[in-house]
Amino acid sequence: MGLLSGKVVLVTGGGNGIGRECALLAAKEGAKVLVNDLGGGLRGGDEGSAGPAETVANEIRAAGGQASHNSESITNFAAVQAMVDQAKRELGGLHAVINPAGILRDSMFHKMDPADFDKVVEVHLRGAFNVARASIEHFRDQKDGAYVFFTSTSGLYGNIGQSNYGSAKMGVAGLSRIIALEGARSNVRANCLSPIAWTRMTQSVPVTDEAGLERQRAMAAAISPNQPARVAIAMAASTMTGQIIGCSGNTVAVFSQIRVVEQLDMGENWDSQAILDRAIPALEPRFHNVEKNPSAGLIGISVD
């Protein structure tokens, strides 16, 4: 018996990278899998192809598993509703959604094309909304359902040149948390995975110096899409909810979430000058530095 025996799992972005590994591993663990992939490039907006999703579904079937494929975009809510219906019709139900589908359109913020900001937010954040909204009533009715959303250290820590991607990924973490809170009574679980893996997204990150090139060589040698995929499958099978889990190579981590770390009682008679004179100096020792997390290691490189 596999971890997902008797379950039906929708995997978005399942034609390449981590998504592909998630689809294959879900099938190996006994799930029937609907493999979704638009078949487009990293930037999105180009013409897609059914090829990647169909190839992975065929690979699952060749290994003795059950799978269907779908090449619609998760940015289209009606198309995602049709995916849920397809899973029910062709595979007999739906019990989990693993959602690594994504694109990159990196740029320094002062050069960011508004269209590039909108498109990345549309794919990552609106796409996460679409897959959840299209399936959550089904999950609530059957009193069972799991979401594995994909966030990123670009949002959790911040990363230069990825204001669109980081904003979307931080939004996904907030969405996941609220779905977890609202779904608790109905056994609807929602968690986020923040992965690092050597995929075409990783390879697309610009390298500007020898240190960056050396980091990429280290990533290629140490991390693979199969590692975070293993974590994603465990999350889909788990009873946990409301968590942000990280995976980098052979390391699995849990992230802290936003909470108050210090507060100051200002009394009753205070103004903005008092904030400058009293509150900010008192709170400053707990401020975060505006820099990349020095302890993040490879997790400081944001890719999924």
Image: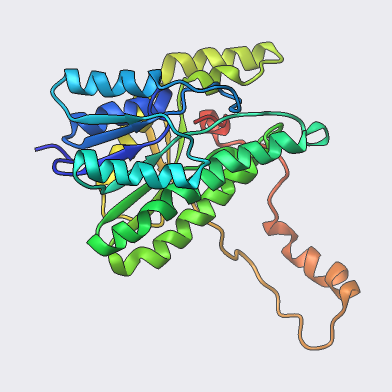
235 or 46, which lies in front? 46
Q: Does the image show residue 244?
A: no
Residue 218 position in % (x across, y down): 50, 16
Q: Residue at the left extreme? A: 1
User: Which quadrant of the rendered structure holds the N terminus?
Assistant: top left
- Look at the picture and state if 83 lies above or below 18: below
Instruction: Name the residue: 72% across, 36% down.
Output: 115
To which quarter of the image does residue 46 belong? Answer: top right
Residue 285 in the figure: left or right of residue 11? right
55 or 265, which lies in front? 55
To which quarter of the image does residue 23 belong? Answer: top left
Residue 29 position in % (x across, y down): 18, 34
Residue 38 in the figure: left or right of residue 95? right
102 or 268, which lies in front? 102
Residue 154 position in % (x across, y down): 60, 38
Q: Residue at the bottom extreme? A: 268
Instruction: Name the residue: 34% across, 61% down.
Output: 137
Q: Does the image show residue 236?
A: yes
